[in-house]
Image (tube, rainbow, N blue to C red):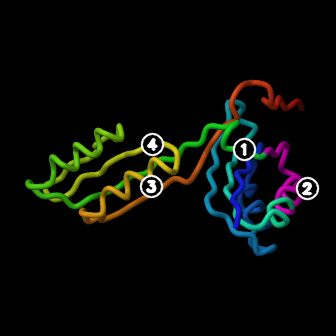
Amino acid sequence: MNKKVFQLLVENSSGVLSRISGLFSRRGYNIESITAGVTADERYTRITIVASGDDEILDQIEKQVAKLVDVRNIKVLTPHDSVYRELCLIKVEVSEQNRESLIAIANIFRAGIIDVAAESMIIELTGNPSKIEAFLGLLTGYTILELARTGLTGLSRGSEDVVWLDD
């Protein structure tokens, strides 16, 4: 199974995310993650979808998504020509004995401690997926109470392939 990161510029209209995800479910395609947010131009939303499948399926996904009425542009974000980021919030059980060691691990990864309670801490980490996986791997001796990940979002490097949409 391969993964591909698709970046879509779509009309910022009601139901657009539902129509796009519906295409995936109707065809039996798998979405690894999906993020969406308004762009600098509020008429458009940027959606980043990470999908998995063999090359034929991934090519078919790209063609089918491009046909949707709301989709104004689609491009594939490749790892060497793009910047990927993900946000992760991790609530970890702590005690007086292990609080300082957890803070030290968070500092190494430039993670922020955004909430502290008597028996838990919430850590905020932003980075590429491998950084987040590495951080989570170091938490094996701790009890993770809750975990929330945003999914991947990204932009292509440079300005050569910036898409300008006209009315």
Q: Earlier in the sequence, mark 1 or mark 4?
A: 1
Provide the residue designation for mark 1: 77
Q: Tell me, for residue 133, which label it has, or none.
A: 3
Q: Is residue 150 left or right of residue 120?
A: right
Residue type marked 2: Lys
Whole-angstrom CA distance, mark 4 to mark 2, is: 33 Å
Mark 4 residue crowding within 10 angstroms, few (<14) / some (14–19) / many (20+) = some
Q: Secondary structure at mark 3?
A: helix
Picture coordinates of residue 115 (x, y %)? 26, 47
Whole-angstrom CA distance, mark 4 to mark 3, is: 11 Å
Residue type marked 1: Leu
The magenta-colored residue range is 60-75
Whole-angstrom CA distance, mark 2 to mark 3, is: 35 Å
User: Where 19 sits versus 9, above or below?
Assistant: below
Whole-angstrom CA distance, mark 1 to mark 2, is: 19 Å
Q: Is residue 143 left or right of residue 22?
A: left
Q: Tell me, for residue 126, which label it has, or none.
A: 4
